[in-house]
Image (spheres, helix red, strand yellow):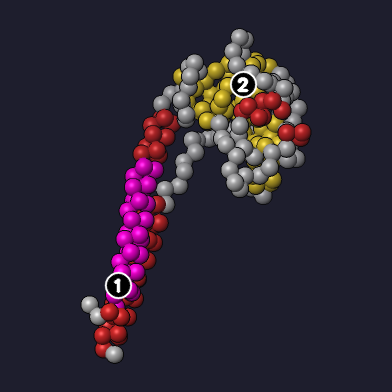
Amino acid sequence: MPPRLRLPAISTAVMLVILIALGSWQLQRREWKAGILAQIDAAERLPAIPMPETPTAFQKVRLEGTLRTDLQASYAFELRDGRPGTHLIVPLERTGQKAILVDLGFLPDAAPHPYPVENHAVEGFIRPAEQAGSFAGKDDPAHRHFYTLDPAVIGAALGETNVAPYTLIALAPAVAGQMPDPAHAFPRPPNDHLNYALTWFGFAVTLSIVFLLYARKALRA
């Protein structure tokens, strides 16, 4: 190999290894995400079971207790059908057990909030506690508005110091005009890793073509 091509060739080879490795990693992530989606599909098809002592993430459960709708927090921000709103979070208390925070669903800002405190049966799925990310909004415990679904933090703001370390996301069929509007299906994270893999492999192909054109020109000079 001519000396003038040695450094470009080495640099190209190193970059190709990196790009191919990144593409292969995205293919592995694709398989991993497909497994998660399959687990979610399977969990959604199963009937709800009575709340176990230690439920697992995305397990579909049902339970009864006192729905403390006099203790309300709002979570996140959402624009639905042109209406701004948040998710309504309230504790569900059970005798001799930890309270469980329940996400009752989307509630437009203009909707009224007077709900009676009552014994209530709730069906939904278990969502593990979140940790605040770098780009998460800043929680406002004084006004009970949160951007991170952390039951311990939200529960403390509501005066509930003994809460379960997860949230129950209420599930119910869509009903026109129902407020708050609960979840109608399990959440499904997007699986775009094949596109990411093709992008990295595309960069590798482009880099190879550029180097070959450069080498051809250099050898003719």
**Looking at the rendering, which quadrant does residue 147 occupy?**
top right
Decide if residue 43 is in sight here: yes
Question: Mark 1 against mark 2, which lies toward the viewer?
Answer: 1
88 over 84 or under it: above or below: above
Between 159 and 16, the one nearer to me in the picture: 16
Between 120 and 68, the one nearer to me in the picture: 68
Q: Amino acid at mark 1?
A: Ala
Residue 17: image location, x then y, percent: 31, 61
Residue 135: image location, x then y, percent: 61, 48
Return the residue found at the far bottom.
221
Residue with the mark numbered 2 = 163
Q: Identify the main secondary structure in magenta.
A: helix
Residue at 37% in and 56% down: 22
**Looking at the rendering, which quadrant does residue 150 occupy?**
top right
* Residue 119 lies within the magenta run: no
Specify start and end residues of the magenta stretch as a single range: 5-33
Instruction: Specify the quadrant that holds the C terminus.
Output: bottom left
Q: Work out how far the residue at label 1 is from the one at label 2, CA to CA, in angstroms.
A: 60 Å
Residue at 37% in and 47% down: 29
Residue with the mark numbered 1 = 9
Decide if residue 50 is in sight here: no
